[in-house]
Amino acid sequence: MIETIGWIIIWIGIAFDILGCLGLIRFPDVYNRLQASTKCVTLGTFGIMIGIFLIHGFTPMGIKALICGLFILLTSPVGAHALMRGSIIFGIKLWKGSVLDRYGKEKLGGERIEDR
Amino acid sequence: MVIFFIFGFGLWLLLTLTLHWSSVIAGLLASLLTTLIYGGYFTRHPIRFLQPHRWFWLLVYIPYFIWFMIRANLDVAFRVLHPDRPINPGIVKIKTILKTDTAKVFLANSITLTPGTMTCDIDGEYLYIHWIDVRAQDVEGASRIIARPFEKILRRIFE
């Protein structure tokens, strides 16, 4: 029973991973792509790890999977944040359909949005 | 420092899951080295680890957070699969009521993993957020939509 639930969670995780990759292709600029990839890939990989934990239970493998999942949950947003801040400071502009850029206006002197 | 050392060593024991003497000695050395380098960054109020109500609110926070994460993923999935690609992005600024650094880090991480928002930078009590669907451009409105659901609980855990 628990094994079946574990497999279902693993398949849901894989589906979210695929959606994250699709978002990486479909979204227009680096910031939106980071949004899609970070969220979907974090929950997808976390789901795969939880599924492995449910299938194997409290064996060495299951506990390692659980700890890896928690580490991914904690570190992946930090990595995405570093990438995003780096690309802003490097000077990559926002997509032309963007509404406003308060960070550029207040910190870098002028909004940084692509010309229409 | 001592708590950091115990924490690191416990993590090592969980990861290796053996009490063989060579493994334990390697773990002791590794956690000692980590403590010497990073122990100073850990926490200034170790007594807070022993207060049970903080652990209780942490246990409340985890399912709440996972629920928000699942909503975030369905939201991104909808935007990816919709033929018109309905996005309306921009960078907004919000003001947080949290004071300690740890709480701010957890708030920034939670914001990154929840629907359509991602932290760009922290500046004192202001956070700059990249929002995939801007619904409020002023500081108060954006703070109310993005940060309030987490701040209520995070304040009870960390402050």
Image (cartoon, coloured by chain):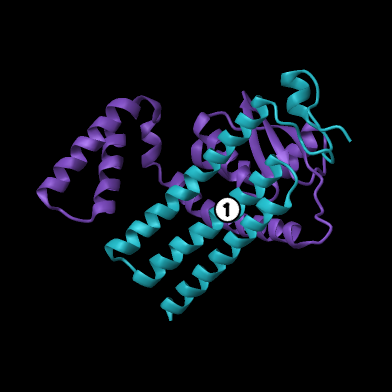
Nearer to me, A110 or B38: A110
Q: Position of residue A17 (x, y in %)?
A: 57, 60
**Callout 1 secondary element:** helix
Res A82 visible: yes
Residue type pointed to by label 1: Phe
User: Which chain does the numbered disc 1 sit on?
Assistant: B
Q: Quadrant of residue B119?
A: top right
| Quarter residue A34 falls in | top right
Observer-nearest of B116 and B77: B77
The percent position of residue A42, horizontal first and vertical second, equals 54, 53
- Label 1 neighbour load within 10 Å: few <14, some 14-19, many 20+: some
Residue sitting at x 65%, y 26%: A90
The tint of chain A in the picture is cyan
Spot occupied by residue B5 in the image (x, y as percentages of width and height): 27, 36
- Chain B: what color? purple
In-image side of A75 versus B140 (left or right): left
Residue identifier under label 1:
B65
